[in-house]
Image: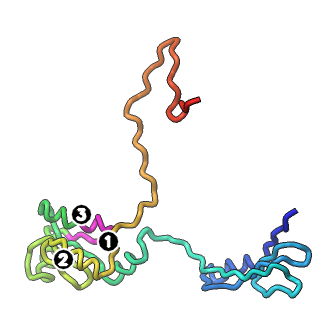
């Protein structure tokens, strides 16, 4: 029978050490004198056969929906869009940010003190205005906005979707069966014989 695998407690301890935040750990796989496969963090004995050194990388769990590049850009250069319902220009400005998957804060300049914030930032009351960190782009010009986002390190495309798109339910209810009729086979089951 094939050699049995023995899980050495040291290997389990390695995986749990420091909450899984190991850099690179040396582990050995070998066959002992009794023919059993052993994994250990200790050097194998001289009688071991088929010794294979292995490297274990750090363990981590991805908990954020944003890619690392976007997370770093958001921390260093947060994006703020100053706008209001100004029609197609403001819609195109917001659409650009959404197309690139850029997280941003929207400031409606018609609400409260937001108009005064815009005036202090730009010296004008014209929208849309894009603020990327300390950089301010007045008016919507896609090439300038793209350049500002590129220089801040935002990815050019949004992260891939992780959840499948739900299927729309069938719009037609099933037709009632006439007595003595035979129903057609269900979709996918009418393969040729």
- Picture coordinates of residue 162 (x, y %)? 45, 60
- Picture coordinates of residue 67 (x, y %)? 42, 73
SS state under label 2: helix
Q: How crowded is mark 2: few (under 14 residues within 10 Å), some or many (20 or more)?
A: some
Q: Residue at x 32, y 71 (%)?
A: 156
Q: Which of marks 1 and 3 is nearer the N terminus?
A: 3
Q: Which residue is drawn at 43% across and 48% down?
A: 166
Kindly identify which residue carries mark 1: 156
Q: How crowded is mark 1: few (under 14 residues within 10 Å), some or many (20 or more)?
A: some
Part of the protein shown in magenta:
95-107
SS state under label 1: loop
- Picture coordinates of residue 165 (x, y %)? 42, 51
Is 180 drawn above or below residue 126 in the view shown? Answer: above
Mark closer to the observer (3, 2): 2
Q: How far apart are marks 3 and 2 (CA)?
A: 15 Å
Mark 2 touches mark 1? (CB < 8 Å): no
Mark 1 touches mark 3? (CB < 8 Å): no
Kindly identify which residue carries mark 2: 144
Q: Earlier in the sequence, mark 3 or mark 2?
A: 3
Q: Distance between the residues labelled 2 and 1?
A: 14 Å
Q: Say whether residue 10 is visible.
A: no
Q: Which residue lies furthest to the right in this view?
A: 34
Q: Which residue is drawn at 34% across and 74% down?
A: 155
SS state under label 3: helix
Camera-side residue of 87 and 182: 182
Numbered tag placed on residue 95 in the rendering: 3
């Amino acid at each position: 029978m094939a050699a049995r695998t023995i899980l050495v407690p040291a290997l389990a301890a390695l995986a749990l050490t420091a909450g899984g935040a190991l850099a690179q750990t040396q582990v050995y796989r070998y066959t002992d004198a009794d023919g059993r496969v052993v994994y250990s963090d200790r050097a194998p004995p001289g009688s071991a056969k088929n010794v294979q050194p292995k490297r274990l990388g750090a363990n981590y769990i991805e908990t954020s929906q944003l890619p690392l590049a976007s997370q770093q850009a958001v921390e260093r250069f947060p994006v703020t869009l100053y706008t209001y319902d100004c029609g197609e220009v403001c819609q195109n400005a917001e659409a650009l940010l959404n197309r690139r998957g850029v997280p941003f804060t929207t400031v409606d300049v018609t609400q409260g003190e937001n108009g005064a914030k815009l005036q202090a930032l730009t010296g004008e009351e014209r929208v849309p205005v894009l603020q990327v960190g300390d950089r301010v782009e007045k008016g919507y010009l896609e090439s300038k906005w793209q350049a500002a986002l590129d220089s801040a390190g935002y990815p050019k495309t949004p992260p891939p979707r992780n959840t499948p798109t739900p299927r729309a339910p069938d719009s037609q209810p099933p037709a009632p069966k006439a007595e003595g009729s035979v129903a057609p086979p269900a979709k996918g089951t009418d393969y040729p014989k």
